[in-house]
Structure formats: C-alpha cells, structure tokens
Image: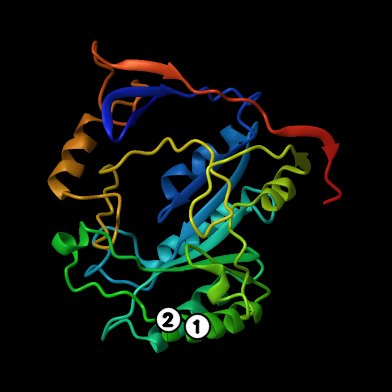
Amino acid sequence: MVRNPFNFHQVTRYSLDPKVVDLIGFCTKNPTPMLRSVPLLEEYGQYWFVSVTPYASDLEPYVPPVNVVIKSLIQLASLLPFGCVALRYDPVILTDVYTEEVHYKSFDSICRCLNGVLDTAVVSFIREYPKHQYTYPQLKTVPMDAKRRMIVNLTRIASGFGITLKLCGEEPSFFEDLPVTVGGCLTYELFEKVLGCSLRRERYQRIRNCDCLMGHDIGAYNSCLHMCRYCYANYLEEEVKAHARQHNVNSPLLIGELLPEDHVTSAKQSSWKTDQNSMF
C-alpha cells in the first residue's frame, strides 16, 4: 500500500501477484541488503539500476564506499541473467572538486571493474529543485557545452568496455547527433528482452523528454537514509529518521500504519505479456 504524496489519507493498494506483475524495477545505491532476497523473486522479471558515483561524504554522507558498492553490484549481477543489471552514473555534478577530468577517471575505473558484468550505463546530469536552496544552495546546473563534451567522452570510455551509454532526462533533440542512446532507459524493447516475450502496447504516463514506461511506483518521499545532498526525494534529515523509526515490517505501508480515516483503493493491474515469445 502506498500513500499519495499530495493527499496523505489517499492510499493505493497494489497486488504483488506474479499474474499481474510482469517485472519489478529497483533503483539503489547499495544493493547489499537485498542480495539474499533476489532468489525469492524468481517468479518476477527483474531489472536493477545500481548507482555508482565518485562523490565523498560531502555529497553522499551515508552511501557505502565505491569499491563496496561495485562488489555488491557484481554479486547482484551473478544472481540474475546477463542484461538485468545496469549501471547508473548519476547525477553528474561539476564543482571545483568534481571536475570533468575527475568524472572521466572515475567512470573509466568503474567501467573497468564492471567489464563483462553488464552492458548498459545510464548517465544523467543534476537538476535543480526548489528544495536545493536549503539542502545544497551552491548547486549549479551543468552547462550545455559541458554536457555534450562529457557525453562524447563518457560514451568513448563505455564503448571501450562493451557498454552502451544511455542518456536520461535530457531533451533528445539536443543530443541525437552524438553517439549516445536518447530513447529512454526503461523501454518496451528493454523489457521485452529481459522478459523474453512480447508486450502489448499500453497507454502509459510519459515524462517530458523520456520514452520510459511508467509502471506503479511504490516508494515514498523522505524514506532514504543515505541523505545525499542533491536528492530530490528527501527534504529533512530529522523527518527521514522519524520515518525510519515508524517502519514496521508487518505493515503494508513502507512508513507507519493504516489509519481509520485512510481511503484505500485498489490499483487497476493486468499483465502486459503476450503469448508471443521474443526472438531474443
């Protein structure tokens, strides 16, 4: 069950029955706590994004060190078919400390460690949100000329290790002349390859500048203890800690319990799989 972030007492109930859930997607900076559970999810298709970034505790105070995350990513990939785990190198932030050259060296080192482990890396650049004036006031967007230059160099590095680079959250027309995939990172084609079957084309929510499929998001704001300063989903550290204390493994909600005044409705769900097997 998931609370509507804009209407606290509006709750949506989602079924986790494999008959209506074709695939579960995960995004994480630390897959270690989930490794033991991956085999328990074999009834579902799985696709994982694991973020590995070069930032220290100044930006990511509670994220494990890069070498620890990479080791965990490799363990995760060993539990799944090839192609079900992708690297996210994001958000790209430029500062006096984290320069373009630092990013190139870091990305090369990460790709070198993951050579043969995965085939896809997704890059996105930092975006400013209103909350950043409180959590990260010195944050600056990356200029367009730097974005284009970095995409060219990051693509070159990735291709040297057999990794395809995909761009996330940018206007495709600004980059379609560059050697980078701009058609989305969670597409029909990707899911059909992962699931090994065709999917019927459904209408789906489309984010601006993004062809990714939008399923059902069962996360919650202010619930991640990594407390990255650039994160758009966390606002106040004390609120995050308070929410963590309210977590109950026996509750259908990620945070807290159902209340008498909650209005619960069931989501409309059905499988998108067809009977046609994919040639892949």
Quadrant of residue 55 within the rendered picture:
bottom left
Q: Are marks 1 and 2 in contact (CB under 8 Å)?
A: yes
Measured as percent of width and height from the top left, residue 27 is found at 46, 50
Measured as percent of width and height from the top left, residue 112 is found at 57, 77
Query: Which of 34 and 121 lies nearest the eye of the viewer?
Result: 121
For image coordinates 42% across by 35% down, the residue present is 218
Q: Which mark is residue 115?
A: none
Which residue does the numbered mark 2 point to in the structure image? 144
Q: Is residue 195 above or below residue 170?
A: above
| Quadrant where the N terminus is found in the figure | top left
For image coordinates 84% across by 40% down, the residue present is 277
Hey, what amino acid is under mark 1? Answer: Arg
Mark yes or no: residue 105 visible: no
Residue at the outermost top position: 260
Measured as percent of width and height from the top left, residue 209 is found at 51, 60
Structural crowding at the residue carrying mark 1, measured as other residues with C-alpha within 10 Å and reported as few (<14), some (14–19) or many (≥20): some
Left or right of 187? Residue 93 is left
Query: Which of 68 and 63 lies nearest the eye of the viewer?
Result: 63
Which residue does the numbered mark 1 point to in the structure image? 148
Query: Which of 68 and 163 lies nearest the eye of the viewer?
Result: 163
For image coordinates 67% across by 29% down, the residue present is 271
